[in-house]
Image (tube, helix red, strand yellow):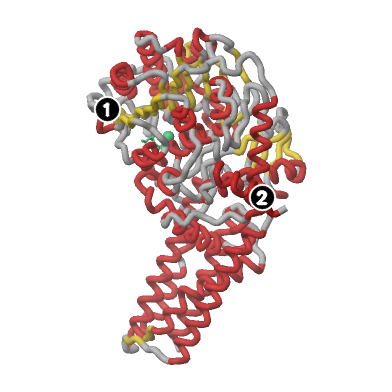
Amino acid sequence: MPGLWLILLTLLSLNIKFAVCSLTVGFSLSFIPLFFNFIFLCFDISLLLFFEGQLLFWATIILNFFFSLFVFGDLEFFNYFNHFIPTCSHRHIKELFDSIGSLKKLFNLLYLFYFIDLPILFFIFYRPLHRASRKISISIRKVLSVVTIWIVMIILIIYQYHHLKTLPISQRSDSEIVENNGILSYHALDYINYIRAQSGLGQTVSDQDLNLIGNVLREKREQYRSRRDELFGIARGMNVIIVLLESFENFNLNTVINGREITPHLNKLLKESLYFSNFFTQIGPGSTSDSEFAVNTSLYPMISSVIYSDYYKNDFSSLPRILKKSGYHTYVFHGNRGQFWNRGQMYQAQGIERFFSGEDFSIDEVIGMGLSDKSFFRQSLEKTGQFAQQPFYGFYITLSTHYPFKLPASLDPHLDWGGKFASTTLWNYFTIIHYEDEAVAEFLEGLRKLNLLDNSLIVFYGDHHIYLRNSAKKITQDLGLPYHLMIKSKVPLIIRLPHGKFAREITSPCGQVDVLPTILYLLGVENPDIFLGTNVLLQQPDFVALSRFFQPDGSFVSAKHLYLNTRRKLVSGECYTLPDFKLVDGKECLPEYRKVEETLQISDLIIRGNINSAKLKATAQSGKSNQ
Ligand code: GP9
Ligand code: MN
């Protein structure tokens, strides 16, 4: 009897923990998610019925501990990424830790609550159960009960998996799943999607969804083709040089501290470039790699997959592939090891002719995670001069400005004009950004010497903000910037046309998915097929979906609104009017929010279902012949 009590109390306490976890991060609770959580927990706990005595005691305590750890992990993860732990993350622990820097800053003592029942249960049940013999007991009654629970559970998962596909596309986000079906349903469905992706099964996309995808993509194409100005094809046939600036926030540019600029060279570059001053990061759990993905494919990074690892076998229509068709040679340069974010495999699948990774560089000067950017640029230019056949696409990924923002003593310029910022993390960051600014100037000078500066389209963009979650407010206050979450999602996008022609500032809000159509327009590509972004040179995007990993999914900026889906339920999310940042009723953002969710889910389906133009054409054809 004490054994059964222990099982029941464990079941109860775990249900409470999952419910509290949901509430803590802002989901509302209703009967169905609670019920689904209950069934999932019964499913796992049912196996304990076969144990008795000491064995039952220890098995229950251990199971309880692991589930508690799971809830705790979910909460910690949510705290940082606004999302519960996706299945894919176990393969990326190293990358995630490198990104965050340290988990210590996330820890909250209150979360020990999730373990409080363990000593209590231990204290109550240790004696009675320890005296009882330790054994495994199997009876027909127990087997029948367990099998029944498992059947109910399996039916429930299959039902949820299929039911989800019948919902309007805008209501299939992970947050809707957690809200409507509970945390454990989210994990189960995410696990199924992950296994399908890993086994190459992909996802079958219904004809109805395929038609919707086809229509949305057609609209995008028509929008792209409908307007032209003198910039169309201005860089036709030129080299395309893209520089990814690691952890580079937009607020570095034009910031003056005690009369000195942090980025004097980049500020000069802005004056001879198209400068997109309201450009947002849109990364997912794949961090830097996701920014590469968004820029090169104009699809949105996923919320629960590292695309570079899970979908590298897809036929993405990416910038290097498009350019390859017009005779371009394609190269990537990065000073870190080639397998980080599975880049080696992804690039191969993306038609990159040669990936120069850490293994190809002489690591003669180290900053933070690896090769210093000055040395990286110097060696990359040597390789470019030596190997690159023109026209070429070159993607250069920097590294030195990655957390922990520390220059080794030999390279530290000891900038003495920090004033009140001196010896703060922000000043360390600015110091390293100042270093990066010099590195960029040397790179541009190197391009000039190679005669590449004025026969290339040169793009600089930031991959994501710095992960200093709690100090963002202070930073912006100190800098005298109006504090807003918008600030920390903003990164630079700078496009230099030969001889600095057509330089101007473009203030429309835009994001990383908009880079591809914008570049293609400058290169004069007539008819790109799959892309979800907008050519920002001629049109203001309807919305910019903010990073799904750092803001709750569905958050966006548009010309009229900023919507932060902070409390999950749309009505309790924060809808601000722009440019005055006035908080208004969440419902005002509803129509745009639905459009954002629809686009994000379409992007997910394109990736999960490996939808390419051939597939879309085939559906359109079969649709016609069925009519
Ligand atoms: C690693 C570099 C940094 O190679 O691109 O990655 P991050 O941690 O920012 O994703
Ligand atoms: Mn990065």
Compared across the picture, whether 194 is left or right of 587 comes to: left
Q: Quadrant of ligand 1?
A: top left
Expressed as whole percent of the image width and height from the top left, the position of residue 343 reads 37, 39
Identify which amino acid the numbered label 2 is placed on.
Ser
What x and y, as percent, mark residue 531? 58, 36
Label 2: few (<14), some or many (≥20) within 10 Å?
A: some
Outermost residue to the front:
625
Q: Which residue is mark 1?
A: 366
Pick whichever, 451 or 601, lies toward us.
451
Q: Of circles 1 and 2, which is in front?
A: 2
In the rendered image, is residue 189 in sight? yes
Q: Please tell me whether mark 1 sits on a helix, a strand or a loop.
A: strand
Of residue 69 and residue 595, the one placed in the foreground of this image is 595
Q: Which mark is residue 170?
A: 2
Q: Residue at x 53, y 64 (%)?
A: 184
- Of labels 1 and 2, earlier in sequence is 2
- On residue 195, the disc is none
The type of residue carrying mark 1 is Val
